[in-house]
Amino acid sequence: MLPLTRVTIIVEWYNMTYAEAARARHLLESVREQATETLRLAGTSGQRPAVELIIAHDADRVCAADIESALGGALRTDSAMSLQLLAVRNATYCRLKNAAAQIATADVVVFLDCDVIPEPGWLETITSPFADPSVDVVVGNTYVDCEDGKTYSRAMALTWMFPLRDGRGLRDAWGRSSVFYANNLAVRRCVFVSNPFPDTPGLTHHPATLWALHLLGEHTAIWYAPARASHPPPNGPVHFYQRAVAGGRARAITAQERGLRRWLVWGRADLEQVAWGWKRLLTQGRQVGLRAWQVPAALCMSVAYVLCFYLGSVATDTFPAYMRRRFVM
């Protein structure tokens, strides 16, 4: 049974630029089903909803009517889940999350991205650790969705930024986290409101990384629970290229090294990334159903992504003014 009878789930609409509305609809239905189960287990039917869901969007680019059109019947309030659309001016990925957390009413807020689909049991798994009053931050298990069986999806599941799907139960996998991402994250509201994501102009996801480093520096533990949620691979070749270049761009902007030496440092790190990806493809491919005939193409895809990542870093170092205006994602 859930230790919490009420939680605020915050969904940003920033990623919808590259995502499919069907995934957001699936996300809402999954959360609604789990909220209904929470009410049933807690025996609190008829009282306030178990889940307060806030969808935060950029008021300068998206209006409420656009979201209502995209989500259709999934966008509704019922006895298990209340829903609110929050318009934010001059919004970025992390600013949307910050603004929504400010108006949240539950003691624990959970951050989901609009392109992430939680599995059954996700809500219970990510909130159960908060039964321990010493737990302030819990990160779940986001993995790349490769159910379509395509070589591309399976290659990205093995070599992209996310870990593989964790099939273990909560009791088997509870512990300190070795990974961090802001798309499947639960935080005590009082902790987050006093330490929101910092503002770093020109960078989209880096504020979340700085936030995690700040918490660790303050000796606040980040815990892991196998609260599983699937994330799509980059949607098509253009998005694949843009995501890779944007990652390299962020690395160059935040780099500590100076001069041409940084190119060598980046090159060495990226060669190590290629080696790591190839090792995963060859030794863990069966975990995602990778077939022998798919391996050569998957190896090439992993190299292509890392090459675009490296070029993004070099281009930003060479043409900083131009690149700061481009590939902000």
Image (cartoon, rainbow, N blue to C red):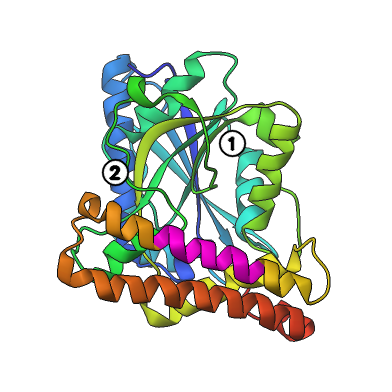
Q: Which residue is mark 1?
A: 104
Q: CA distance from mark 2 to mark 1?
A: 20 Å
**Residue sitting at 70 percent across and 65 percent down?**
90
Q: Residues within 10 Å of mark 1 (few under 14, many from 20)?
A: some
**Residue sitting at 34 percent across and 22 percent down?**
172
**Residue sitting at 27 percent across and 27 percent down?**
37
Q: Amino acid at mark 2?
A: Ser
Give the farthest residue toward the right. Answer: 258
In the image, is residue 3 above or below residue 318? Answer: above
Q: Amino acid at mark 1?
A: Ala
**Residue sitting at 18 percent across and 56 percent down?**
289
Q: Which residue is mark 2?
A: 30
Q: Quadrant of the C terminus?
A: bottom right
Residue 166 seen in the current view? yes
Magenta stretch contains residue 162: no
Disc 1, SS: loop
Magenta residues span 266-277
Disc 2 to disc 1: CB gap under 8 Å: no
Based on the displayed image, in which of its 4 quarters is residue 327 positioned? Answer: bottom right
